[in-house]
C-alpha cells in the first residue's frame, strides 16, 4: 500500500494549497494521504525544534506493516496535475539533488565532522563529491527505511534534518534513483516556465508567499 504524507509545523497559510495538491495527486496514483500536524508551542520532540519532525515520522512509519512505500513532501511544495506516478519508478529511495548544494561538498563534510565524526560517510565524502539530495521530496520503500539507522543525536545545526538524512542514506548504501529537478524545482521566477515544464514546485524561504498565487493561477 502507498502513502503520501506531509508534516505541517504550526498553522502555515500556504500549506492549505500545498496539501490540496497532494490530496489530488494521492487520489490520482491510488495512495492514502496523511497530514502530520506538529505545533512547536505544544509538542517538544527533539528539544522543541521543528527540524526533525520528518525524521520522527519516518521512524514511526517503519514500525507499521500496512504501507510498503511512502512519499513525503514539504508543506511548501505544489504538485502539478501532470506529475507522473513516482510510485511506479524503481529504487529504495527516489529524490532529486539539492539545487544550491548538488553534491556532498566541504560544507557537508564540515557538518559531519562536527556532529558525526565516526560516520562512514566522512571517509567517503573526503574522496569524491557524491550527489546530495534535497529532503523536500522523498519516496522511500519502507523495507529500505528499516535498514537505516535513525537514532540520535539530532543536532540543531543547519540544515539538520537534510544533512542527517543524506548521511543515514549514505551509511545504509540505499539504491537511490536520482530524479531530475523537474520533480523538486526551486527556480520559480518565471511562473509560466515553472508550471509548464516541471512536476513539483518547491517554494523555499521568501518564495513561500508565492505558493498561493501560483495555486490561484493554476486554478483559473
Image: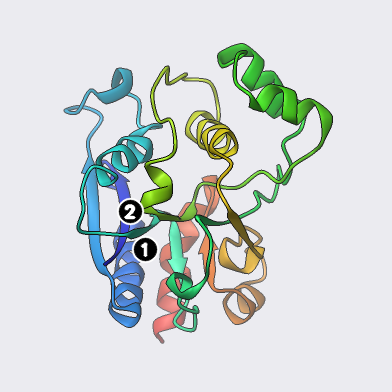
Judge by depth and name the residue closer to the eye, 14 or 23.
23
Lateral position of residue 21 relative to residue 178, left or right: left
Q: Quadrant of the N terminus?
A: bottom left
Is 219 located above or below residue 52 in the figure? below
Is 50 located above or below residue 32 in the figure? above
Instruction: Please give the name of the residue rendered at 47% of the width and 54% of the height, measured from the top-left corner.
Output: 138
Residue 149 x, y percent position in the rendering? 43, 30
Judge by depth and name the residue closer to the eye, 29 or 147.
147
Lateral position of residue 129 relative to residue 214, left or right: right
Instruction: Please give the name of the residue rendered at 52% of the width and 71% of the height, measured from the top-left corner.
Output: 89
Q: Secondary structure at mark 1?
A: helix
Question: CB of mark 2 within 8 Å of CB of mark 1?
Answer: yes
Is 188 located above or below residue 168 in the figure? below
Judge by depth and name the residue closer to the eye, 99 or 129.
129
Tell me the tag on residue 18. Answer: 1
Residue under numbered circle 2: 6
Residue 178 x, y percent position in the rendering? 64, 59
The quadrant where residue 30 appears: bottom left
Instruction: Indicate which disc, 2 or 1, sits on the residue closer to the N terminus.
Output: 2
Neighbours of disc 2 within 10 Å: few (<14), some (14-19), many (20+):
many
Q: Is residue 193 visible?
A: yes
Residue farthest toward the left in the current orientation of the protein: 42
Is 192 located above or below residue 135 in the figure? below
Residue 43 x, y percent position in the rendering? 19, 28
Neighbours of disc 1 within 10 Å: few (<14), some (14-19), many (20+):
many
Q: CA distance from mark 2 to mark 1?
A: 9 Å
Amino acid at each position: 500500500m502507498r502513502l503520501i504524507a506531509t508534516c505541517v509545523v504550526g498553522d502555515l497559510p500556504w500549506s492549505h494549497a500545498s496539501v490540496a495538491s497532494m490530496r489530488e495527486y494521492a487520489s490520482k496514483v491510488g495512495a492514502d494521504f496523511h497530514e502530520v500536524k506538529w505545533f512547536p508551542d505544544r509538542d517538544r520532540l527533539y528539544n522543541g525544534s521543528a527540524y526533525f519532525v520528518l525524521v520522527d515520522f519516518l521512524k514511526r512509519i517503519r514500525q507499521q506493516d500496512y504501507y510498503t512505500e511512502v512519499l513525503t513532501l514539504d508543506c511548501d511544495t505544489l504538485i502539478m496535475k501532470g506529475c507522473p506516478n513516482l510510485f511506479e519508478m524503481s529504487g529504495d529511495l527516489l529524490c532529486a539533488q539539492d539545487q544550491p548544494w548538488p553534491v556532498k561538498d566541504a560544507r557537508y563534510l564540515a557538518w559531519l565532522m562536527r556532529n558525526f565524526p565516526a560516520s562512514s560517510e566522512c571517509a567517503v565524502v573526503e574522496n569524491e563529491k557524491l550527489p546530495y539530495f534535497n529532503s523536500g521530496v522523498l519516496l522511500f520503500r519502507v523495507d529500505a527505511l528499516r535498514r537505516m539507522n535513525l537514532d540520535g543525536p539530532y543536532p540543531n545545526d543547519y540544515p539538520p534534518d537534510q544533512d542527517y538524512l543524506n548521511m543515514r542514506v549514505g551509511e545504509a548504501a540505499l539504491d537511490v534513483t536520482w530524479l531530475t529537478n523537474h520533480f523538486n524545482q526551486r527556480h520559480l521566477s518565471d511562473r509560466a516556465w515553472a508550471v509548464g515544464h516541471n512536476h513539483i514546485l518547491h517554494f523555499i524561504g521568501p518564495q513561500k508567499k508565492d505558493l498561493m498565487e501560483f495555486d490561484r493561477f493554476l486554478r483559473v
